[in-house]
Image: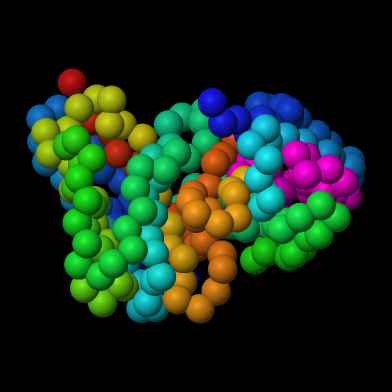
Amino acid sequence: TQLLEQSPQFLSIQEGENLTVYCNSSSVFSSLQWYRQEPGEGPVLLVTVVTGGEVKKLKRLTFQFGDARKDSSLHITAAQPGDTGLYLCAALMEYGNKLVFGAGTILRVKS
Amino acid sequence: DVKVTQSSRYLVKRTGEKVFLECVQDMDHENMFWYRQDPGLGLRLIYFSYDVKMKEKGDIPEGYSVSREKKERFSLILESASTNQTSMYLCASRPVGFGGEKLFFGSGTQLSVL
C-alpha cells in the first residue's frame, strides 16, 4: 500500500481541456512537492506547498494544499501538449526527514 | 546551471554481474540519494548519504550497496545483479539548509538485467 495515493493513474485528454490530479494520505505532511517528469529525463520540481490551505499558481497550473495537510491537488487549465508527462507528488512527513513519493499520474494531452 | 550527471543512460547486464552506477553533482550538495522507479510504484529510496563516507539505508536497500568517497560522487553498486533489479535508477542531490527540500535529479539510468 502506497503511503501517498495519487489519482488518476493515467489521464488522456484533448488540448484545451481542464484536469485535476489528486494526492492523498492518512498522514500529515510537513510539506508537499509536485514534480513533472518528461520521458528520458529525471523529475523536475514544480512547486512546494507548506501551509495548510495554501494555493500556489504557476501559469496554467494551480496547486492546493489541504487544510489538514493530508492531501493536495494539481489543476491544469486549458491543457497543452507540452503538459504531457508524469506528475509526481512527494511529501515530507510530519515526523521524518525523507521524501515519500506517490506512484505518479501519467498525463497525455492530444492536439 | 545545476547538474546531476549519471554516467550511463542505458545498461544491459547479465544475472550475477557486479554493476556500478555512477552519479556526479556539481552543486556542492551535502545530501545525495539513489532511487529506483518502477511503473505504478513511483520512486523508492534505496540509499542516501548525508556526507562523505556516510550512508543510510532507504526503504529497499536489499541487494544494493553504495559508496561516497568524494562529496560530488555517489555510486550505487549491485553486487550480483538479478532480473528483479531491472529498473530505472535515479540519482538526486539536495543542499542542507534553505531550499534544502528541493531534489535535483539526474536523467536516470535504465538498467536491464538479463
Residue B31 rendering spot, x and y as whole percentages = 67, 52
Start and end of the magenta stretch?
B63-92
Looking at the picture, the colour scheme in use is rainbow
Residue A56: % across, % down: 22, 51
- Residue drawn at point x = 89 percent, y = 41 percent: B17
**Quarter of the image that includes the C terminus of chain B:** top right
> Image quadrant for the N terminus of chain B?
top right
- Vertical placement of residue B60 versus A109, above or below: below
| Residue occupying image coordinates x 50% and y 78% | A95
**Residue at x 43% of width, y 63% of height:** A91
Residue B13 image point, x, y percent: 80, 34
Left or right of B28 on screen, residue A71: left
Above or below residue A57? Residue A111 is above
User: Of A96 and A78, which appears nearest the observer?
Assistant: A96
* A93 falls in the magenta region: no
Task: Please give left or right for residue B22 compared with residue B99 in the image.
Answer: right
The furthest residue to the top: A111
Vertically, is B87 above or below B59?
A: above
Task: Tell me the chief SS of the magenta region.
Answer: strand
Q: Can you see residue A21?
A: yes
Q: Please state the horizontal and vertical placement of residue A45, each as a whole percent of the image.
A: 42, 43
Does residue B77 appear anywhere in the picture? Answer: no
Residue B76 in the magenta stretch? The answer is yes
